[in-house]
Image (tube, helix red, strand yellow):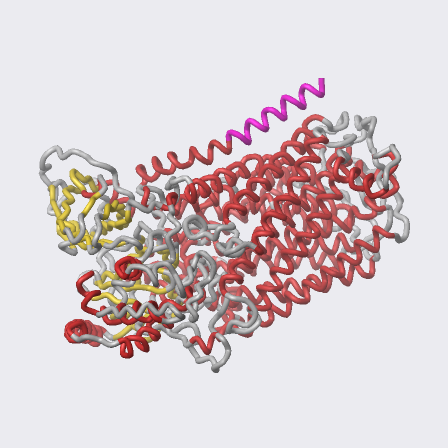
Amino acid sequence: MQTPRERAARSKTSDAVWLKNGLVISLLWGFSHICAANVLDLREGVTDMSHRVQNLHHISLGVCIGIGIIVFGAMIYSVFAHRRSRNPTPARFHENTLVEVTWTVIASLILVIMAVPATTALMDIEDNSDADLTVLITASQWKWHYQYVDADIGFYSNFATPRGQIENTEPKGENYLLEVDKPLVLPTNKKVRFLTTSNDVIHSWWVPDFAVKQDAIPGFINEAWTRVNEPGLYRGQCTELCGKDHAFMPVVVEVRPEEEFDAWLEDQRLAIALTSETAVADRNKQWTIAELQPMGEEVYVSHCATCHQPDGMGQGSKYPALAGGAITTGSIEEHMDRVMNGKAFTEMQAWAPQLSDLEIAAVMTYERNAWGNDTGDIIQPMTIYQAR
Amino acid sequence: MSAHAEDAIPRQRHPLISFAARWLLTTNHKEIGTLYLCLSFTLFFIAGALAMGVRAELFAPGLQLVSPNFYNQLVTLHGLVMVFGAVMPAFVGLANWMIPMMIGAPDMALPRLNNFSFWILPFAFTLLLSSLFMEGGAPNFGWTFYAPLSTTYGPPSTDYFILGVHMMGVSSVLGAINIIVTIFNLRAPGMTLMKMPLFVWTWLITAFMLIMVMPVLAGVVTMMLTDRHFGTSFFQAAGGGDPVMFQHIFWFFGHPEVYIMILPGFGIASQIIPTFARKKLFGYKSMVIATSSIAFLSFIVWGHHMFTTGMPLVAQLFFMYATMLIAVPTGVKVFNWVSTMWRGSLTFETPMLFALGFVIMFTIGGFSGLMLALVPADFQYHDTFFVVAHFHYVLYPGAIFSTMAAVYYWLPKWTGHMYDERLGKIHFWTASIAVNLTFFPMHFSGLAGMPRRIVDYPVQFTDFNMVSSIGAGLLGLTQVLFLYIVVKTIRGGEPATDRVWEGAEGLEWTVPSPAPHHTFQTPPDLHGDLVTETSVRAE
Amino acid sequence: MIRSRKLKHTALLVLLAVGMFGFAFALVPLYTVFCELTGLNGRTAGQESYAGPVVAASDRQITIQFLAHVGNGMPWEFRPTEHRLQVRPGEMHTTMFYARNRATRTVAGQAVPSVTPGQAALHLHKIECFCFTQQELDAGEEMEMPVAFYVDEDLPKEIRTFSLSYTLFPVDSTPGTKVADN
């Protein structure tokens, strides 16, 4: 039984053997390596696999540049040497079976050279067994949810770049569009298996530095794995068009040394206990409309306004207006059902798992009293708790 | 062309009515070809304008000009209109004009059907583009319209999009049937299949591909429609369907479709390069074999668009190897073109420049295609700007440059006037610079990690995007120059000779310039004077 | 003569086009068959019978992870009662999924299974599963729903862990019968 690391090392040597086979190719490979200063190259990444993928990129790029130099070289030579002013009488040949067969065979051989390292790398990528940790990644429009399958810890990772930066009213930060409120945390040197799925449309989870990209498909699960060598913050984005805020769905992963990761897991458990304590206090309190309204507005702006608009006017029939809306001014029970459970096969998602009792109570109270809805209804967190 | 108005409609009527009747009711292959080319040109500018919107928004990070939802509509319509409205009708237009003249036929085999398949298109595109003004906006799910984003999550206008796709499909299939029947039945005596000009060959293969895949596209949009309105669950996991199946069926159409958009371009290059090299095409037989193998392989590689959807290892390996295999026949074609030039007697008029630009830049697109075939690397490239760079390199210098080469090449035959060579050269050089300025930096932004189809991007991609946007603006302007050149040539210019190009060979050059309304009423007899081997040269 | 040949060719090509349109629909069952043969999409088969315990040839242990998802608009709490189970090929096991209807009305749901890696789906045999039929819960009602299954010995050796996931979708609002009740 080999470890993936050994296998990676072995296939690296076989790559090297291939490269030595052709002096031209390795020269070109070196050339492309030098020319391709960081900005022009595929990211090297921080996993053995991402290094292998980068290496594969260099091999294929080198082959392409090599063939390109030969073919374009011949063309350019011909353009200068065989122009009419220099070569007024054209040659008359128009076929040569030997030449045609030769270049077909050579082209096929070059392909084999590229296929070998690609196949070995792919076989290792698809080996998802014996993971130390499994993380379930659930996509929804337009955020990621991470669940540590064996630890009962899960949380949403919401987009966190301020609206002002996007609308050009504030200067953009260094990690513009690549910031979330809570990154996925992983340990170093552990094989982590990712399971991906989606709640609505197809999304794709990508961290370039891990060379992991896997589609999240509603109703189906997919898997991928990584083993990160260096601690750090790694950023990526959703890579499958998933609707209007596709650009605003970053992936951020924080990789910590193993011991720190264990401590972090412990902290999360404590935090859950702590939250449930505050939740008990919150729901046992009677809240006034003056307390709930501003809180509700805050929740509304960060979670609802992107579709239903800050003024509650919505956007067409797809994102209905909440100002004077049938549900926001109708029965409280139906309103609660819609907010907590969402609406099937639409962008309206279930908020019960995402927001606390108090937050749902506040946002519902806000929606029922803002923009001239003036129903005067106050929703207490206790009501929400009982509906869970 | 106005010179033939009289013989098309002999009776005396109000000039406007007779003008409309002439173009609405025409069954003449040259006039229908002209209609196709005009429609394609119009839609090329519309789709180009949409692309300008995309590039303008991407000039700098942050939201400046359009909302995210509208941006997605721009991206979707740009793709759909370019593919189905600009590239495909342009090739059909060229086929209409040239195939009968190249094989010595008096017209297309089914002239009334020809009229019908053209006149569906303006309605289809009016329908599609009018969705921009509908409640909920135009389709916003990308030209690949993956389910469920396009089914249960699609805007109301999706139904118009579905109807539009059906209409385009019917038009393409009828057009393709017409081309095949023409080639099989109306070739001049002595014009055997293996003596046909390469443009006719590539179109014959393309037409078969169209008939085989456009109905599959029609099938998949029909399934979308029933999923949206009639309670089926083809692509909905909830009802036992599978969204990934959409992608399988779509790409079963989609991959042959991308070859449909390039094979006629191969044919055009194979006509033009020998003309200006004054030397016969190298490896005619291997060209035919290579084109057929590309067409065949295109039906078994669709999975390479879907490597990240979670396929079993065996399937990934199969699609990877099959895709890499396509590099061989494609490579053979490029080698053949270079060998055709080798020791020829080259001149570089505008059609030749565009054909050479086509060969070089299409090859660059082919290289990145080969890189994309390698699955582990594809995991990094997939759905990034690297892919955007790849398919724009095969489509812009591939499909569009080859069409432009064809227009410059045959425009004197169509209009009887030479185009302005100086302006043509300016057009070529500015367009080539602009194409590379626009699309080359996209390789780098993709490698650095920029996903495609995003309305806004992280700041580290700014430089590449600015260069791309500037290039795109320039590229748009160069096409206005192209329009000017074409209009100017139609209106007048130095009279063209019948052969037009000193090295030109083939039946189309034996008729007068401009080509009269009716040609080859009695088929030329080619026995003993084999077209592809003829050594007659106007010297 | 030419005319009748033209018509014949046209008819054949139209037939080809119509045939290809039909082929698009034939791809749907073909895809299902293909998936059942290769495990392409990780769908499990329907109800199967259990022939009794097979003596396991080895001490091979397979880990199965259980996962549960709730689709939008489904007011249920839904989760596995155990995260993972160690099984040996041939042994029958039963695991429970917990469901509770949070709504104040009766709601029906349909669970859709998915297995990754997909090939494992070919070797997972279910004798009983709540996913075979629609499940209905009254307001506030809860229940434990069983899945009885065994894994056959032909499961490829390199698969030592696989995941079985269920996504629960509401039944009354299939996409085709959308109600305009926003």
Q: Position of residue A37 (x, y in %)?
A: 50, 73
Q: Position of residue C94 (x, y in %)?
A: 12, 45
Residue range of the region highlighted in magenta in the rendering: C1-19
Residue B320, can we see it?
no
> Which residue is at the front of the view, A384 or B392?
A384
| Quadrant (top left/top right/bottom left/bottom right) for the C terminus of chain B | top right
- Residue A303 relative to residue B539: left or right: left
- Residue A81 relative to residue A118: left or right: right
List the single residue furthest toward the top: C1
Q: Position of residue B324 (x, y in %)?
A: 49, 48
Q: What is the magenta segment's predominant secondary structure?
A: helix
User: Can you tell which quarter of the image residue A52 is in?
Assistant: bottom left
User: Can you tell which quarter of the image residue B431 is in?
Assistant: bottom right
B535 part of magenta stretch:
no
Residue at image point 75% right, 49% down: B407
Relative to A354, residue B105 above or below: above
User: Can you tell which quarter of the image residue C56 is in?
Assistant: top left
- Residue C33 relative to residue B85: left or right: left
Residue B216, can we see it?
yes
- Residue B373 relative to residue B437: left or right: left
C16 part of magenta stretch:
yes
Residue at image point 22% right, 73% down: A261
| Quadrant (top left/top right/bottom left/bottom right) for the N terminus of chain B | top right
Q: How many marks?
A: 0
Relative to B225, residue A182 above or below: below
Q: Position of residue B428 (x, y in %)?
A: 73, 60
> Which residue is at the front of the view, A265 or C166?
C166
List the single residue furthest toward the bottom: A171
> Which residue is at the front of the view, B169 or B335?
B169
